[in-house]
Image: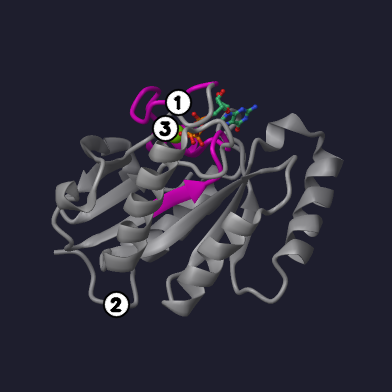
């Protein structure tokens, strides 16, 4: 087992717009993906806590940007999910604004964990996230979540399929399950690389 500095993570704040974001210093990793792929569950598994990030069977539950503090100058960020059709237009517009502001202005963003459901395809919105990060030299790690929903052989097939779907982009990827903790060491290694041995000046 790798050491897991994220176990000590605590909730910092929820922000519905850029004026409420915490100070843009140190380093943070953002978790993004379509609504209901398990972003909040993944954060709970990584931090080894059950109720840190709020999860729900109802898509669109996380409507604000939720910030968590690992330690001074190191944060995890739960972004609201995209691509949920039932969300009213005015709320979707607010999401667009807050997500755009986040990606356009957040200098402490050290890496993006892009979460997808193993049973789905990569969406245009997912690819937009990847393109945005590549243009800004921000590394992307694709977390293929809910692996427990498929038998082992089909998990491997899905991994190959995603490699094809994302061809031409330089992203790393892995299988994961927030339920069974499959792939936990792998994602911890990625986070540690971004937050605790970064290329650019580190926290503190
Ligand atoms: N089987 C299985 N279910 C999962 C896994 N991860 C999350 N879920 C379930 O998927 C549903 C959505 O999980 P959330 O963590 O709330 O998803 P989210 O992406 O944060 O959703 P929004 O905030 O609404 O965008 C819940 O019912 C979770 O219990 C997993 O690895 N395996
Ligand atoms: Mg959520």
N-terminal of the pair, mark 1 or mark 2, is 1
Rendered residue at 44%/28% (across/down): 61
Magenta-tinted stretch: 30-57
**Residue receiving disc 3:** 44
Using a 10 Å C-alpha cutoff, classify the residue at mark 3 as few (fewer than 14 neighbours), some (14 to 19) or many (20 or more): many
Q: Is mark 1 within 8 Å of ligand 1?
A: yes
Determine whether label 3 and label 2 are within 8 Å by CB: no
N-terminal of the pair, mark 1 or mark 3, is 3
Quadrant in which the C terminus appears: bottom left
- Disc marking residue 98: none
Q: Position of residue 39 (x, y in %)?
A: 48, 39
Is 106 left, or right, of 90 in this rendering?
A: left
**Residue receiving disc 1:** 55
Q: Is the residue 134 above or below the residue 186 in the image?
A: below
Q: Is residue 44 or residue 101 the one in the foreground?
A: 101
Q: Position of residue 120 (x, y in %)?
A: 73, 43
- Disc marking residue 200: 2
Rendered residue at 23%/69% (across/down): 202
Determine whether label 1 and label 3 are within 8 Å by CB: yes
Quadrant in the picture for residue 141:
bottom right
Rounded to the nearest angstrom, the CA distance separating label 1 from label 2 is: 33 Å
Rounded to the nearest angstrom, the CA distance separating label 3 from label 2 is: 27 Å
The magenta stretch spans residue 98: no
Colour scheme shown: one colour
């Amino acid at each position: 087992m790798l050491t897991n500095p994220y176990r000590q993570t605590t909730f910092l704040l929820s922000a519905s717009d850029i004026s409420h974001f915490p100070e843009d210093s140190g380093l943070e990793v953002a978790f993004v993906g379509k609504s209901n792929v398990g972003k909040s569950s993944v954060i709970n598994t990584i931090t080894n806590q059950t109720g840190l990030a709020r999860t729900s069977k109802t898509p669109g539950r996380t409507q604000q940007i939720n910030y968590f503090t690992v330690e001074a100058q190191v944060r995890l960020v739960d972004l609201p999910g995209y691509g949920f059709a039932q969300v009213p237009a005015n709320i979707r517009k607010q999401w667009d604004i807050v997500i755009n502001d986040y990606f356009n202005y957040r200098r402490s963003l050290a890496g993006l964990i892009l979460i997808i459901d193993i049973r789905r395809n990569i969406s245009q919105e997912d690819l937009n996230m990847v393109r945005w990060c590549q243009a800004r030299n921000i590394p992307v790690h694709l977390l293929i979540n809910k692996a427990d929903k498929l038998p082992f052989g089909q998990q491997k097939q899905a991994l190959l399929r995603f490699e094809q779907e994302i061809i031409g982009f330089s992203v790393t990827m892995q299988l994961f399950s927030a339920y069974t903790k499959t792939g936990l060491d792998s994602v911890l290694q990625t986070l540690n690389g971004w937050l605790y041995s970064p290329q650019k000046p580190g926290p503190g």
